[in-house]
Amino acid sequence: MSALKNSRQTTNLPAAQPWTPLDRPSTPPLGLLLFDIDGVIRDVAGSYRRALQSTVEHYSGWRPDPACIDALKGEGSWNNDWDASLELLRRHQAKDPGVSFSLPEREALVDVFSGFYFGSDPEGDPSAWDGYICDEPLLVSPTFFSDLSARGLRWGFVSGAEPPSARFLLANRLGLHEAPLIAMGDAPDKPDPSGLLRMASSLLGQPFSAASPTVAYLGDTVADVQTVIQARSQCPDQRFVSLAVAPPHLQSPDQKAARDDYEQRLREAGADVILPETRAALDWAATLG
Ligand SMILES: [Mg+2]
């Protein structure tokens, strides 16, 4: 097991203490907007998703295509890409018992995955990473977040990405050095709403109630939508909104049919609003008042 996965707990949200940003007003926010990261803030088609494909191919010789990965993720319970890789290997083997490979141990698979994703030295200096992580187009500009703040929203990130990867994106790529973040290992995996609730509670600075500002979460998978639904059922008085967006690999015109299907699945899972792209969250924010 790579030490990277277990040794770093990077949440900056102590459970018992509200998070009080230095550069934001102490007045109550107009709303909270929490973000998933992969597929929402950065395009991971050429990185995490490619590492998933390469890992499955490494063991089986079979490279799952993007539609195959989307179908698996559409089931709602394969948010973790290591487990998704293992599950695709399992299903590939079950479908054709004649294929000759043995299922790897999860820890060995994680190391293979990390080699593809981070590169030759996953635990080294992030500036020296040479894996697929170097190819992650941003889906928003840094001013997107200052625009949200200017509109009276507070924001943060609840992601299943590995902490070093999420931190690298936020600090090195977006210049958000103190961004509130809950990443893999900081809370149970989505769709368990614990991480979302903890982040929302810290940023609200007041108890959940019908009178508290709206809490919205923007994600790109069925698991993200289910996280909001579960948060709502645990705190029924609080207003939670599920915003959803199709991931960037479905946003090109030639993917329209696949995108329509994908968005329909998000709606059926309970998404309140489907956004055309992440930046449109600013338009949604404008509807808050
Ligand atoms: Mg995502």
Image: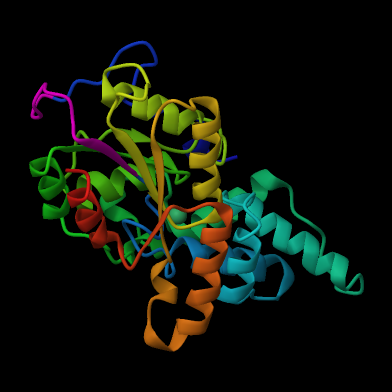
Q: In the image, what residue occupies the spot 13% across and 38% down?
A: 152
Magenta-colored stretch includes residue 7: no
Picture coordinates of residue 274, whole percent (x, y): 40, 61
In the rendered image, is residue 120 in sight?
no
- The image quadrant of residue 98 is bottom right
Above or below, 125 against 246 in this view is above
Q: Quadrant of the C terminus?
A: top left
> On the picture, is 272 further left or further right than 17?
right
Which image quadrant is residue 282 in? bottom left
Picture quarter with ligand 1: bottom left
Of all residues shown, which one is farthest toward the right?
98
Main secondary structure type of the part rendered in magenta: loop
**Residue pictured at 29% horizontal, 54% vertical:** 128
Expressed as whole percent of the image width and height from the top left, the position of residue 42 reads 33, 60
- Name the foreground residue: 285 vs 182: 285
Point out the stretch of residues depicted in magenta: 22-34
**Residue located 37% across and 21% down the image:** 209
Query: How far across and how far down the image is residue 238, in percent?
Result: 40, 28
Q: Tell me the residue at 18%/31% (across/down).
A: 29
Q: Where is residue 70 in the image (x, y as percent from the top left)?
A: 58, 67
- Left or right: 22 with respect to 163? left
Image position of 269 (left or right of 201): right
Q: In which quarter of the image is residue 240?
A: top left
Q: In this view, does 27 lie above or below 118?
A: above
Display coloring? rainbow
Q: Which residue lies furthest to the bottom in this view?
A: 254
- Vertically, is 15 above or below 21? above
Total label count?
0
Q: In which quarter of the image is the N terminus?
A: top right
